[in-house]
Amino acid sequence: MVTDFSQVWQQLPGWGYLVVGLAALLVGFSKTAIANVAMLSVAACAALLPTKESTGAILTMYLVADLVAIWVYRRHVAWRLIGRMMPPVAAGIAVGAVFLNWVSDWALKRTIGVILLALLVVGLRPGKLEAERRPVAAAYGGLAGFTTMVANAGGPAFSLYLLAARFDKLRFLGTSAWFYFAINVAKLPVSIVLGVMRPPVALFGLAFAPVVLVGAVLGRRFVARLDQGVFDRLVMVFIGVAVVCLLVG
């Protein structure tokens, strides 16, 4: 693992660039196709880079991919739902920022993994969740904000909510695009204060922006070929992958 981020360009081996490039490709793909695929990117970058800096680099890639997804799915957004979830998301981010300085990274990730695993097992599959209900949106919004702040893992919680609410794939992706963009922008000032986002880190992430764009294009073409049932199952599979990454990472 690289230990001095100021020397990352010199210290990262050639195969390391390939791994980060693949991570960037998956970030773009996840935003326009199957949510939570990007958890593999988080795990890959965390294995190569210092924890805080890898979070900042991935956040930079996320923001690029968010903007692409917003444009691609601009006609498929549940604005009312996003509005209801933003206040609890902000609260979750604030709590997560506090926990980052008080609880170990190991404990945080495993706690989040257990929570998400419980939601996955309990499943929310029978019956449609009322997306308009404030307590439900608040609970999932708070969890998404907390998990995205401490482990870049807000996606699984939000995806579980949208699946339970029976969103079709385009509305799922369009709503997710704006939700993730808003949440990532909200994280930005907190990340700067905590030292997670610094100019060298942002530049490192931006260097892989073209690869992120390629992943987004591939994702859009891929999802266009999927029927709703396959899409839902793939989202559930990668929620499971995200949980495993948190529990064993």
Image (tube, rainbow, N blue to C red):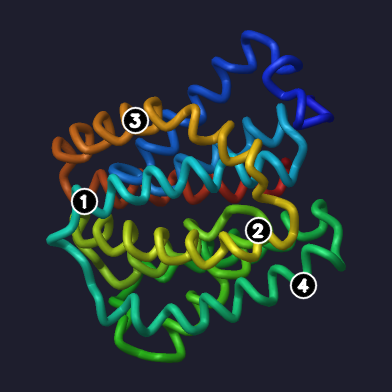
Q: Is the C-beta separation of discs 1 and 4 under 8 Å?
A: no
Residue 142: x and y, percent? Answer: 55, 77
Q: CA distance from mark 3 to mark 4?
A: 34 Å
Comes first in the chain, label 1 or label 2: 1
Relative horizontal placement of residue 82, taking residue 98 as reference (left or right)? left
Q: Which residue is mark 2?
A: 191
Quickly name the residue at label 4.
98
Label 1 belongs to which residue? 71
Q: Quadrant of residue 104?
A: bottom right
Picture coordinates of residue 144, whole percent (x, y) = 53, 68
The residue positioned 53% from the left and 62% from the top of the image is: 121
Give how far apart the Cα atoms at labels 3 and 2 are.
Answer: 25 Å
Write down the residue under mark 3.
215
Q: Are marks 3 and 2 in contact (CB under 8 Å)?
A: no
Percent position of residue 99, x then y: 78, 69
Q: Secondary structure at mark 3?
A: helix
Kind of residue at badge 3: Gly
Point out residue 11 in the picture as x, y percentages from the top left corner.
76, 16
Question: Mark number for residue 32?
Answer: none
Above or below residue 197? Residue 210 is: above
Amino acid on which disc 1 is placed: Trp
Q: Callout 4: helix, strand or loop?
A: helix
Residue at point 32%, 63% (across, down): 178
Q: CA distance from mark 1 to mark 2?
A: 25 Å
**Could you tell me which secondary element the residue under label 1 belongs to?**
helix
- Neighbourhood count class around disc 3 (C-alpha, 10 Å): few under 14, some 14–19, many 20 upward: many
